[in-house]
Image (cartoon, grey):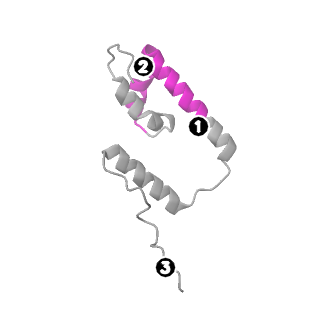
Amino acid sequence: MSCGEPHETDCSEVLDHLYEFLDHEMPDSDCTKFEVHFEECSPCLEKYGLEQAVKKLVKRCCGQDDVPTDLRAKVMGRIELIRSGQTVPEHDVTAAPATPQES
């Protein structure tokens, strides 16, 4: 997505790292670049607002549940595979293989 206008920070970069911004997981200098971009770019600001609202809704509805460490690691591993452009297997490669039933 792009608004078609030139910006110091490209729309695609902002959208690719939107959750890092929302989660405060980026350096202050990058946060400042994103804030400037949102001031200039209404489509990205709208997307930011939508994602922020979804995050708040999920936190309100599911925020009390603890996430198992191994599940978090699996999800983060898949996210990294997707970000790096690698093929993500359709089945869970970390799950134990199914054992055949005895007759």
* Quarter residue 61 falls in: top right
Inspect the magenta stretch and tell me whether residue 79 lies in it. no
* Residue under the image location 50 percent in, 34 percent down: 22
Q: Which residue is mark 3?
A: 100
Q: Position of residue 4 (x, y in %)?
A: 35, 15
Q: Residue at 46%, 58% (x, y): give it.
A: 73
- Kind of residue at disc 2: Val
Residue on which the image places disc 2: 36
Q: Which mark is residue 23?
A: none
Q: Which residue is mark 1?
A: 55
Residue 58 falls in which quadrant of the image?
Answer: top right
- As for residue 40 lying within the magenta part, the answer is yes
Q: How far across and down, in percent of the image, does residue 12 sit? A: 36, 28
Q: Earlier in the sequence, mark 3 or mark 1?
A: 1
Front: mark 2 or 1: 1
Residue 51 in the image, given as x and y percentages of width and height: 54, 32
3 or 2: tag closer to the N-terminus: 2
